[in-house]
Amino acid sequence: MQKRFAHENFPPEIQAKADRMNLEESQVPAYTLPAILPAGVQNGIDFQTRARPFLLGLLEKYLYGVVPPHCQEFRCELTAEQRDAFAGLATRREFTLHCRQNGLHRALNLLVYLPNQVSRPAAVFLGLNFAGNAACSTDPDVIYQKPDFYPSLGTIRYADSRATEAQRGTQASRWEFEQVLKRGYAAATMCYYDVYPDRPDGFENSIMRLFYQPQEWSSPERNSGAISAWAWGISRAIDCLQTQPEIDSRRIIVHGHSRLGKTALWAGANDQRIALTVSNCSGTCGAKLAKRIYGENYEWILAWNPHWLRGDFSRWSGRENEIPVDQHQLLALVAPRLLYIASASEDVYADPKGEFLAAQAASEAYALFGSAGLEAAEQPAPGQLSCGDIGYYLRRGEHAVTPENWQALLEYCDRKLG
Ligand code: GCU
């Protein structure tokens, strides 16, 4: 049967773009990836001193633009603490991260759970969320942050701009906080809308307002985008987590799903405090190779989300084979730290095979550090965890994060970070 990516809400011009996506493996044209490393890079020291800046520069120049520097003033304010959350399993702390630059202020709201029954500082899972901290947890006491700019995603609707009780925990199965805490890990999350509202007009209420003038941001030459803003937010959350004695700063895990999987990878590439970077169904401009023409293409990303990438990224629409960079180079930037790529078998749009092949290609960077990188020689069958320094897991099913994803990821973390 011919596969088709279609939705009843797509206007005809959007459906026409969707119909231009290739979803047939037999139709993937031959392609050549750019060399992953600059010439002459032979060992880990060369990688850190020459390949890292080179690769970061390429990805900044062609895709994501730059992640802003730290802000002039930064303060973590503890706004709430409860020592017996989840019936005593965890301590919950909520922080407001005050970011000030050029006389402007933005506040980010970070929710943190620390496991109570542990004998040493805990590794922490940090991820941005789609619908506000309260939606991630069944815990009745999580604070609703000012939700004015929060998204109305599917069932998560904010009546009169206020979250209601009915929305609490609606995304909890994506976070599995109690499982994570029972296994001895800490967990932290912050809504990506706090950092940059995910809309083409999100700039005014974003942290980018601290660093750019409106005319710079609306210019076609804009040298950054929302994915870089979100990556910046992850680094500020890490700044706060590092102040918590119950957290082991050497075992910070950053994870994300879909557009936030793309973000987790860009954060992992930039911030070397991250010990393990996890992307789930990150697809195009995430783990998937762009030059392998299968699934979502640049044209489609740009149709919906021109604000995600730098202003002049649009010139590469339909030109995946000409852009002088590909996503194996993004994954390589995580080396020699741990990387874990999760895909879903029915998520054809994100191209699971293209994600696996990028991870395979990125192993060349791990080899400079004496690591095999990805251990699986072939894409593993659904349900088979591959546990190299680049981990890989294919879940049977659709574009989602499920309890099965957590089981596999926790097993990987126990083995590699335990
Ligand atoms: C859109 C986008 C994808 C993205 C996905 C998501 O469909 O085109 O690239 O991964 O949203 O974030 O759910």
Image (cartoon, rainbow, N blue to C red):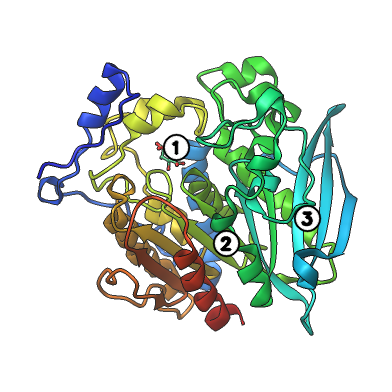
Displayed-image quarter of ligand 1: top left
**Dot in front, 1 or 2:** 1
Residue in view at x 49 percent, y 76 percent: 369
Q: Camera-side residue: 363 or 88? A: 88
Q: Judge left or right: residue 261 versus residue 19.
A: right
Tell me: is circle 3 under 8 Å from ligand 1. no
Q: Secondary structure at mark 2?
A: helix
Q: Which callout, 3 or 2, points to the residue nearer the camera? A: 3
Quarter holding the N terminus is: top left
Q: Earlier in the sequence, mark 3 or mark 1?
A: 1
**Residue with the mark numbered 3:** 239
Q: Residues within 10 Å of mark 3 (few under 14, many from 20)?
A: some
Q: CA distance from mark 3 to mark 2?
A: 24 Å
Q: Position of residue 140 (x, y in %)?
A: 75, 52
- Amino acid type, callout 1: Tyr
Q: Which residue is mark 1?
A: 62
Residue drawn at x 52%, y 22% as measured from the top left: 221
Element marked by disc 1: helix
The residue identified by callout 2 is: 49
Q: Is mark 1 within 8 Å of ligand 1?
A: no
Image position, residue 202 (x, y; %): 62, 25
Gap in angstroms between the C-alphas marked 1 and 2: 21 Å
Q: Estimate the x, y position of residue 70 in percent, counting from the top left.
A: 76, 44
Left-right relation of 129 to 145? left
Amino acid type, label 2? Thr
Q: Residues within 10 Å of mark 1 (few under 14, many from 20)?
A: many
Of the pair 71 and 136, the residue shown nearer to us: 136
Up-down relation of residue 173 to residue 245 (above or below): above
Q: Amino acid at mark 3?
A: Asp
| Outermost residue, front side | 166
